[in-house]
Amino acid sequence: MQKIDWMQEVNERKDDLVSDLRQLLQIKSVLDEENASFDAPLGKGIKEALQYLLNLGEKDGFIAKNVGNLAGHLEMGTGEELIGVLCHVDVVPEGDGWSVDPYGGEVKEGKIYSRGASDDKGPTMAAYYAMKIIKELKLPLNKRVRMIIGTDEESNWRCVDHYFKNEEMPTTGFAPDADFPIINAEKGISDYDIVLPAKKIDQTNHMLISFYSGRRYNMVPDHATAVLSFSGEQTDLIQEYSSFLEKNELKGSYFIESGELHLELEGISAHGMEPKNGKNAGLFLLKFLTQLELDSQAKRYIDFGVHILFNQSRGEGLGIDFKDEITGDLTVNVGKMQYEQANGGSFGINMRYPVTFDMQKGKETIIKKASEHGFSIENFSDSKPHHVDENNALIKILQKVYEEQTGEKAELLSIGGGTYARSLKSGVAFGALFPGRPDVMHQKDEYMFIEDLLKATAIYAQAIYELAQ
Ligand SMILES: [Zn+2]
């Protein structure tokens, strides 16, 4: 291998790199299915961003291929094995509150601003220039290197689904779409509903008419409402509710409408990957309701929530608590709850499980536990855990390169979330957010430090060069 001053090579191309990135940032590549067409299935903006990168690559001498207008690739080198660099050019909507044009690509105070600057157009352009430098220096490669460009990472991953159905899976590779140093382990993610079918209601004095909390599996709900029909004295109940809220340091309110009592409760929202960071409004409201003598169907629903799910974010209640050294604890988030007197009820679960967890057995345990209480499991989905062993050659090379380029130790990270790298058979997430930098992805005024952009480019160039030997 030749010794190259990668940082110098990057600095010589700095102006072009920033200018090409600005052009990519100026394309509003937000999913737009309402205006989709046959040759732009995810909308015009996304198509334009994909085409921009493919054209750029073609002009620079890469083999460019558009794969169904959902993905594409740029390839260089020759050889049997294939190194994949997986990026994406779609972005989430800009949202409100920007102090700069969200699609302006403005450069100020050492940062480049725009939706997508750090997720994932900046890192994508860094990886692109990394390949371009190797190409321009005419460095010999023993493997092919392919930048795979996705366009639906922020939504449904239809890009990689389509791409890998039709194209070769790289032998190894990385996705510059998360954090440096290296994320080599990601928990499995499974969503499912625990469903209580509707039953005939026994008429009692107190009945639960409806109960709702949460809209997304992967969030801790911060709001819950219950509607009760309640014959008799309501003052005591309201008094009890107030003291329950106070005792648990929660906010809530109530009102009476057409003789029905409405209870509202405010919790604290958090990402579902760590339910302990929030306060689940729905489960707390069920905890309060458990004190009341309600009809038997409501009681069955509430008891399950309180005894099996409340305060059991490690899956203890479901009998699936598990942890391993690589990825830590299994977590259970109850993100969606609903109950209607006429229709029964459900709990929507987002479960993140360690890489060594036996999901087959786990699923059986969950089904068994649910059925013991009269519930069933529906809408089960499962995204397998992702793990590349720390002794894998890929990891060794990326660690060495990162340490040489930054002078910092390349720790391996394990996370509860899922990164784009999991769509590679053997790949890791590798940058481009450096340790200590604020994560502004999906935020207003998203930016990337130019300095980081250049450093990432040098790291990617050396990494790709060494991986392709
Ligand atoms: Zn991304």
Image (cartoon, rainbow, N blue to C red):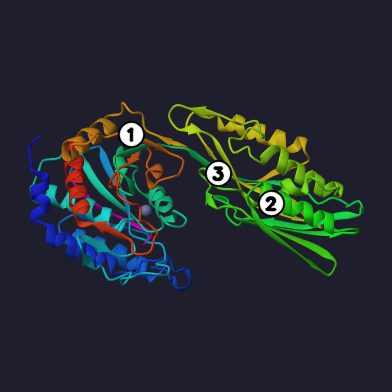
Question: Residue 245 bears which disc, if any?
Answer: 2
Residue at image position (47%, 68%) is 33
Disc 1 target residue: 412
The segment highlighted magenta reads 69-76
How many marks can you see?
3
- Measured Cα–Cα span from mark 2 to mark 1: 42 Å
Which mark lies nearer to you, 2 or 3?
2
Residue at image position (69%, 57%) is 212
- Measured Cα–Cα span from mark 3 to mark 1: 24 Å
Residue at image position (73%, 56%) is 211
Question: Residue 275 bears which disc, if any?
Answer: 3
Q: The C terminus appears in which quarter of the rendering?
A: top left
- Residue 351 lies left or right of residue 430; in this view the side is right
Image location (x, y in percent) of residue 104: 27, 71
In the displayed structure, 153 sits above or below 182; it is below
Magenta span: chief secondary structure: strand
Image location (x, y in percent) of residue 47: 35, 66
Of the two numbered discs 2 and 3 on the same chain, state the one appearing first in sequence: 2
Q: Secondary structure at mark 1?
A: strand
9 or 173, nearer to the observer: 9
155 or 204, nearer to the observer: 204
228 or 131, nearer to the observer: 228
Q: Residues within 10 Å of mark 3 (few under 14, many from 20)?
A: many
Question: Residue 60 bears which disc, if any?
Answer: none
Of the two numbered discs 3 and 1 on the same chain, state the one appearing first in sequence: 3
Q: Amino acid at mark 1?
A: Leu
Which mark lies nearer to you, 2 or 1?
2
- Residue 442 lies left or right of residue 136; in this view the side is right
